[in-house]
Image: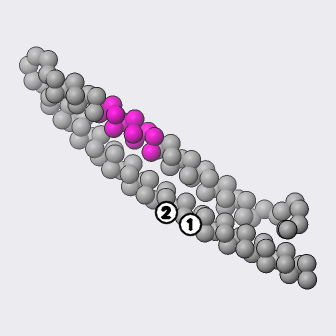
Amino acid sequence: MAKDTDGAYLAHVSDTLEEHGKQLSAIQTVLGMMLDTLQAQTEMLTEVLAAARDEPGDSPVAQALTNLTAAVSENTQAVNTMAESMNDMASQLVASGHEAPDTPAP
């Protein structure tokens, strides 16, 4: 009977890890879409900033766009870091689901 209980427990753990892996995959997909959006915004802001800098004299618009571009770039990096962390976490979950436990299940 203990083997059946252990088998059921391991199956439950495996199912749980698989579900967490799917959830992390969905999160990664969303983070990837966010990164794509932020990258597009950064490219557009860079173009606008270049156009604003072409105006004669100092432009408060150019400084505002410089600040905005820097902020979007920081946000992009933060989302990228989150995506990398989620990827690492998903890999660890998948790897841990295939390892044999050292101790019997409770």
Residue 74 part of the magenta segment: yes
Q: Secondary structure at mark 1?
A: helix
Q: Is residue 97 left or right of residue 63?
A: right
> Residue at 82% of width from left, 64% of height from top?
100
Q: Name the spot of residue 27 as percent of width and height, x first.
A: 49, 58
Residue 33 part of the magenta segment: no
Q: Which residue is mark 1?
A: 22
> Residue at 89% of width from left, 78% of height from top?
3
Q: Is residue 21 left or right of residue 35?
A: right
Label 1 close to label 2 by CB (< 8 Å): yes
Task: Name which quarter of the figure residue 98 lies in.
Answer: bottom right
Hey, what amino acid is under mark 1?
Lys
The image's mark for residue 26 is 2
Q: Name the spot of residue 70 as percent of width and height, x first.
A: 33, 31
Figure quadrant of the N terminus: bottom right
Q: Name the spot of residue 2 as percent of width and height, x first.
A: 91, 78
> Residue at 82% of width from left, 77% of height from top?
7
Main secondary structure of the magenta stretch: helix
> Residue at 79% of width from left, 73% of height from top?
9
**Which region is colored magenta?**
69-79
